[in-house]
Image (cartoon, rainbow, N blue to C red):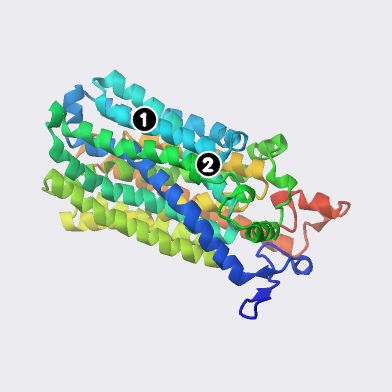
Amino acid sequence: MDGGKKMECIPSQEMTSEEANDVPKIDHVAEQKLVRKLDLHIIPIFMLLYLFSFLDRVNIGNARLYGMEEDLGLKGNQYQTAVSILFVTYILSEVPSNLVLKKFTPSRWISFISTAWGIIATLTGITQNYAGLIACRLLLGLVEGGLFPGATVYLTLFYTKRELALRIGYLFCSAAIAGAIGGLLAYGIGFMDGVSGQSGWRWILIIEGLPSFVLGIATWFLLADNPGTAFYLSDEEKHLMKVRLDRQVGQTASAQEFHKADVYAALKDWKVYAFCAGQFGTDTMLYGYSTFLPTIIKGIGNWSTAQTQALTIPCYCLGALSYVVVAWISDSQGKRGLYTVIFGGVSVIGYGILLSDSNMGVHYFGCFLVAMGLYITTGLPLAWLPNNQPRYGKRTTATGMQLTVGNTSGIMAAFLYPTSEGTRFIRGHAVTLAMVGIANVIFAIMSWYLSRQNDRRRRGEEDAKVANMSEDEIAELGDRSPRFVYTV
């Protein structure tokens, strides 16, 4: 062994002192190098995929500013319906997509859905009427729905509990970047209005849809299906991957296979439904803010379309920076609930400011406060729930349910900011404030409950449940094992 390397046997966060004696030794210098390599080969792919996915999903908000409603003859709530209808098929596809991820392999399945939504997003730019727009949005939701839940599950195959939140955070950074560059792109592409006889909004949808098609094809070749087939890992690194994941309680070979019993376990676990309800509240803010921020900002001042687009960029940048910093702290401390609740409160204050009778500067400051908590409050629970599901089948089902229920809020959010209620949008801000507040209460209760369960297990109060079980049987219990320590 190289004298410069440090090899230790450090117990995993989840392990008891008795189990620590059997923990395989880890070369932490080699592990750090391995994680950097994983980040290099995995994170950029998913960041780009989610960036283009989010951009293709919400660029209808920018298209609205460049005459889409007038060209397609949209009336009344037809625009809001077009925005929300995507989420009908989006949410219906999330759980099924997660359940077939392993069967079709991640590289092929994610490549397929990415290429498909690139084609659909591009063709949305040539639709000629309301019916065509609705058809495109339904199909777009159907194929896009599998990306985020699939990415979340995929990351758990490569990263440990203490590394997951930051990596999911990178995806939310992509959403923030999409919001920021979406405004810039829309501003630049808007000057193509009239080119080849097409309106500027059509060019926005066409040009922003093409990268997804190209990246989808590349994903087939760039994405490994699991650590064992990762072309960029040496045999020694693959062994280290196995040791890393085996050190976590419940991460047995059998637990990482798909079992129907684990699906049923997720469906019967009340904690999963609590996370689903909380996600609904935070996603109401995510989709309302991401889709209608240009409309909100335009309503609080006398700005041109170009100025409005520019003013959205600092908000998204602050949201992305806040999440990266907090996700890193959350991973290093192994705490999710504390930061979820704190920054949910920051967003609530932001909406309170937007509801107040104040000048445009104060209202714009409120947009920053909302952005500061936006991705943290939405993103940390998406790492929190899978952290507490060591068995693959239950993890994929629970994550799919969480995202499915959460994304149903996109249907409601689309109707919270109708043009007729501008420029203050009192109802939209009030409903969103209430939903985030309720989510905060749910996550605070879950953090308290899981901490209490950890204390009971630490005191040995649940050991009687496994008194007559073998070590192998206990290991297969997953989060129900008295030895499993919940992330709080």
| Residue 176: image tag | none
For numbered disc 2, what is the local secondary structure?
Answer: helix
Nearer to the camera, 40 or 295: 40
Nearer to the camera, 321 or 210: 210
Q: Is residue 163 left or right of residue 288?
A: right
Task: Confirm or deny contact between disc 1 and disc 2 (CB under 8 A).
Answer: no
Q: Is residue 322 above or below residue 479?
A: below
Q: Amino acid at mark 2?
A: Gly
**Closer to the eye: label 1 or 2:** 1
Which residue is found at the position 74% from the left and 45% from the top? 254
Q: Is residue 95 above or below residue 163?
A: above
Q: Is residue 384 above or below residue 91?
A: below
Q: Residues within 10 Å of mark 2 (few under 14, many from 20)?
A: many
Q: Is residue 3 above or below residue 435?
A: below
The residue where tag 2 is placed is 150
Residue 336: image location, x then y, percent: 52, 59
Q: Is residue 300 left or right of residue 407?
A: left
The residue where tag 1 is placed is 119
For numbered disc 1, what is the local secondary structure?
Answer: helix
Which residue is found at the position 15% from the left and 37% from the top? 192
Nearer to the camera, 56 or 357: 56
Which residue is found at the position 68% from the left and 62% from the top? 14
Point out the image quarter for the C terminus.
Answer: bottom right
Classify residue 419 by image quadrant.
top left
Q: Residue furthest bottom?
A: 3
Residue 409: image location, x then y, percent: 42, 37
Q: Tell me, yes or no, if residue 451 can be seen here.
A: yes
